[in-house]
Image: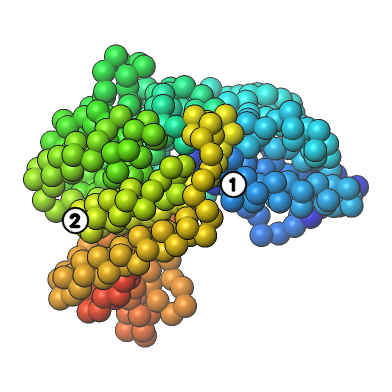
Amino acid sequence: MKTKGNQKDKVNIVTLGCSKNLVDSEVLLTQLKGNSINAVHESAQDDANIIIINTCGFIDRAKQESIDTILRFADAKENGQIDKLYVTGCLSQRYKDDLEKEIPQVDAYFGTRDLPLLLKKFKADYKAELVGERLITTAKHYAYLKISEGCDRPCSFCAIPIMRGKHLSKSLEDLVLEARNLARNGVKELILIAQDLTYYGLDLYKKRNLDELLNRLADVEGIEWIRLQYAYPSGFPLEVLDVIASKPTICKYLDMPLQHASDSMLKLMRRGITRQKTEQLLDTIRQRIPEIAIRTTLIVGHPQESEQDFEEMMDFVEKQAFDRLGVFTYSHEDNTHSYSFEDDVPEETKAERLEAVMDLQQDISLAKNQTKVGKRLKVLFDRKESGFYVGRTESDSPEVDNEVLVKAEKDTYIRLGDFAELEITEAQEFDLYGKLVGSLA
């Protein structure tokens, strides 16, 4: 870390939490640099004298990580290793008053929509001309595109509306401009994110407008993959399926967090849907796009979740055989509707149920992967690691899904950020192995 007495300030942005937070940090980085401020993201060198922490406040583990990070840099400030410490993001939005009392070493706390106020601390202006411009911190060939902010859904367990506010869509024009700029800078894959993609446009256009957005993004030159994450099942706009099916640049992939399968739990969670309607929706999606990969996430241990409720979840997972699946243990979040219930499922039981679901999904994933042996797949390569080139298929999103590995032998060269055709030679539970057949760059 930079010591006091050095003349030129350097800002390091530390990001915690989800991809939506990462986009916020990238916008902040772009604005700081646009104001001629020396700023970096997640610098490996301890040479910055100003730290901005973009926090997560989603569940207990994420909140604790954010607090631990703030305390670490607060100690660094007390020891004279940094000059200024600012905190922004979800945790700061939700617990600002408490944090100001408990960790006064922080120079200022900001909420999730306080970017102009944060910039003022650097005597910087919010530059509207930079809207649509963004410096990305991911690998240069893919980027997250946040199409809206906030959420209007009433899910009983979720604190996101408390931290992120009401749903607010970006305009079609701004999103297409941003996509074009990203493509011009080498991005080949756009990953669309929001708290709920399917709500897009209701506030601006008085209708669900995700299908029109996808049609327009699919026409952006240079973008080869468009991936959808975080679609809500209740009220899902079926016209989106026609666009996915008809546009080759839109991945046959859908991330739809379902959270549970028991009707009693879905009602307690205020999800606005039943198991039967969920299964009907999944059937419709698969009928209209037979090759689609569906990813979901589930919650175990919500208050009043009985053994029967959990068995219904297990039955649902087994019958639906999702391509990708993740599980969270319930986190008792204050000021949510679920907080009014007793957190009555023991932590040990939550952990056991999580392990049981993932054991089942491991078997499902292995069986699905084994069907791919001998097939040829289009793969986008992200990195080289431990003697392997590591990439992803159309069915896989970065960080959370399966990967494809190719041994980096002397006669094998794959340029990172390029597509290649592979023949799959081996399948494991969550990884595929293959050999290079040809380049698709």
Which residue lies at the image location 78% right of the left edge and 32% below the top edge? Answer: 100
Q: Considering the image in quadrants, where does the C terminus appear?
A: bottom left
Q: Is residue 382 left or right of residue 62?
A: left
Q: CA distance from mark 1 to mark 2?
A: 31 Å
In the displayed structure, does residue 417 sit left or right of residue 40?
A: left
Residue at 29% x, 14% y is 206
Judge whether 20 appears above or below 93 on screen: below
The residue under label 1 is 60
Quadrant of the drawing holding the N terminus: bottom right
Q: Note whether residue 433 is visible.
A: yes
Secondary structure state at the residue bearing disc 1? helix
Q: Residue at x 18, y 70 (%)?
A: 372
Q: Nearer the viewer, residue 420 or 265?
A: 265
2 with respect to 245 (left or right):
right
Task: Give the structural element (helix, strand or loop) at label 2.
Answer: helix
Q: Which residue is mark 2?
A: 319
Residue drawn at x 13%, y 44% as measured from the top left: 283
Amino acid type at circle 2 is Lys
- Depth check, front residue: 301 or 171: 301
Q: Residues within 10 Å of mark 1 (few under 14, many from 20)?
A: some
The numbered mark at residue 196 is none
Tell which of 94 and 441 is nearer to you: 94
Asked if residue 184 can be seen in this view, the reply is no
Q: Is residue 129 left or right of residue 206?
A: right
Q: Earlier in the sequence, mark 1 or mark 2?
A: 1
Q: Is residue 211 above or below residue 351?
A: above
